[in-house]
Image (spheres, rainbow, N blue to C red):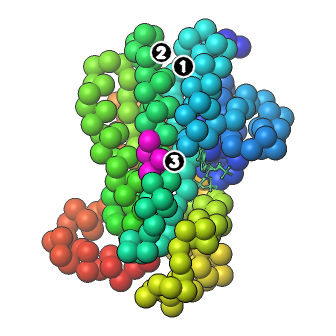
């Protein structure tokens, strides 16, 4: 039992994290999964997963997670999959500072905190894998997604820098860039729009009606949407390939976006992208 490879997976109450935690466990990993609510612990535990409470906006829960996991493994950890996050929708001019701050606190600062706290164990054992669930929106910006774009672009910058700095340490670092994936992501985004965006007072009020219909799933499924198993396939590669890639792009729309950004002149690219979303 103790020689199973070990991994921390965050954001396992739903979507990609819930799927990947279970898939890893059935592939023989010892999985330490995190959620934010007590009632989300049970379903993971009944699937043989060791579950913990951790909220990226609460630094003491991050330290406590790392302490408990390392106590259980004798100070070792093979991998970390940073995944738990949310998307703050809203035009940039409508974003209150506290909305942007919370978005960055959750999707960037918390991830950085957890990552820094596991690196010493990985350095000491001479190996480790750090996989970050970014997004195609960390490569290609999208209208009404400025806060989320900013968080994922920041994540890309930190992660790619860290990848170069850790070269030769035995710790491999990769980003997964999903396009549309079935999960609670859009449903969860609704609450953050309602909490932070003054829809009626915005010059974009009409656009928000359309966006809210989309977030509530009333405008049909997104083109090219895949299940969380597609992200798991990329995660498995990032965790097991001898030379893991910096980027694993998942879904056809994400691949198209990344290729067009490389091929098209910037002004043309942003004109086309500006009609989407
Ligand atoms: N679905 C997509 O189309 C898509 C596309 C590209 C990238 N992604 C990325 O995929 C990852 C997983 O998202 P998902 O699609 O699986 O969405 P999801 O179903 O909404 O799951 C998000 C998970 O993150 C957790 N989370 C939210 N805020 C957190 C915080 N402050 N601290 C710790 N955990 C927190 C949520 O917990 P609660 O249940 O407690 O809120 C939930 O477990 C995210 O990094 C997202 O940016 C998703």
Q: Is residue 1 found left or right of 78 in the rendered image?
A: right
Quadrant for the N terminus, please: top right
Q: Main secondary structure of the magenta part?
A: helix
Circle 2 sits in a helix, a strand or a loop, which is it?
A: helix
From mark 3 to mark 2, how far is it between C-alphas? Answer: 23 Å
Q: Report whether the residue tagged 3 is closer than 8 Å to ligand 1.
A: yes
The residue where tag 2 is placed is: 121
Residue at image position (55%, 43%) is: 57
How crowded is the residue under tag 1: few (<14 C-alpha within 10 Å), some, or many (20+)?
many
Residue 171, position as x, y percentages in the image: 38, 23
Circle 1 sits in a helix, a strand or a loop, which is it?
A: loop
Q: Is residue 151 magenta?
A: no
- Which circle's residue, 1 or 2, is located before the other in the chain? 1
Residue at image position (29%, 63%) is: 259
From mark 1 to mark 3, how far is it between C-alphas? Answer: 23 Å
How crowded is the residue under tag 3: few (<14 C-alpha within 10 Å), some, or many (20+)?
many
- Which circle's residue, 1 or 3, is located before the other in the chain? 1
Residue at image position (54%, 14%) is: 76
Residue 157, position as x, y percentages in the image: 30, 45
Instruction: Quadrant for residue 164, please give it.
Output: top left
Q: Give me the disc on residue 4.
A: none
Range covered by the magenta-colored residues: 103-109
Q: Residue furthest left?
A: 265
From mark 1 to mark 2, how far is it between C-alphas? Answer: 7 Å
Q: How many marks?
A: 3
The residue where tag 3 is placed is: 106
Asked if the residue under mark 2 is in contact with the one under mark 1, i.e. CB atoms within 8 Å, the reply is: yes
User: Of tags 1 and 3, which is closer to the observer?
Assistant: 3
Q: Nearer the viewer, residue 218 or 258?
A: 218
Q: Nearer the viewer, residue 144 or 199?
A: 199
Q: Give me the disc on residue 77.
A: 1
Q: Is residue 160 found left or right of 179 in the rendered image?
A: left
């Amino acid at each position: 039992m103790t020689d199973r490879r070990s991994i921390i997976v965050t954001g396992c109450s739903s979507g990609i994290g819930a799927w990947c935690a279970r898939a890893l466990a059935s592939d023989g990993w010892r999985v330490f999964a995190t959620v934010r609510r007590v009632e989300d612990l049970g379903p993971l535990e009944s699937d043989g997963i060791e579950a913990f409470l951790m909220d990226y906006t609460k630094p003491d829960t991050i330290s406590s997670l790392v302490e408990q996991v390392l106590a259980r493994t004798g100070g070792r950890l093979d991998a970390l999959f940073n995944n738990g996050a949310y998307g703050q929708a809203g035009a940039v001019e409508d974003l209150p500072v506290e909305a942007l701050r919370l978005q960055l606190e959750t999707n960037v600062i918390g991830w950085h905190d957890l990552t820094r706290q596991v690196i010493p164990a990985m350095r000491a054992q001479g190996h480790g894998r750090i996989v970050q669930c970014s997004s195609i929106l960390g490569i290609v910006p999208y209208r009404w997604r400025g806060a989320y774009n900013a968080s994922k672009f920041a994540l890309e910058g930190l992660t790619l820098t860290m990848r170069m700095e850790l070269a030769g340490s035995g710790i491999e670092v990769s980003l997964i860039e999903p396009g549309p994936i079935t999960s609670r992501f859009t449903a969860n985004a609704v609450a953050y729009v309602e909490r932070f965006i003054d829809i009626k007072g915005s010059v974009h009020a009409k656009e928000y009606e359309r966006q809210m219909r989309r977030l509530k799933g009333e405008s049909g499924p997104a083109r090219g949407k895949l299940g969380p198993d597609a992200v798991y396939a990329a995660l498995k590669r990032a965790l097991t390939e001898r030379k893991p890639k910096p980027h694993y792009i998942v879904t056809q729309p994400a691949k198209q976006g990344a290729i067009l950004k490389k091929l098209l002149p910037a002004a043309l690219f942003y004109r086309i992208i500006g009609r989407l979303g």
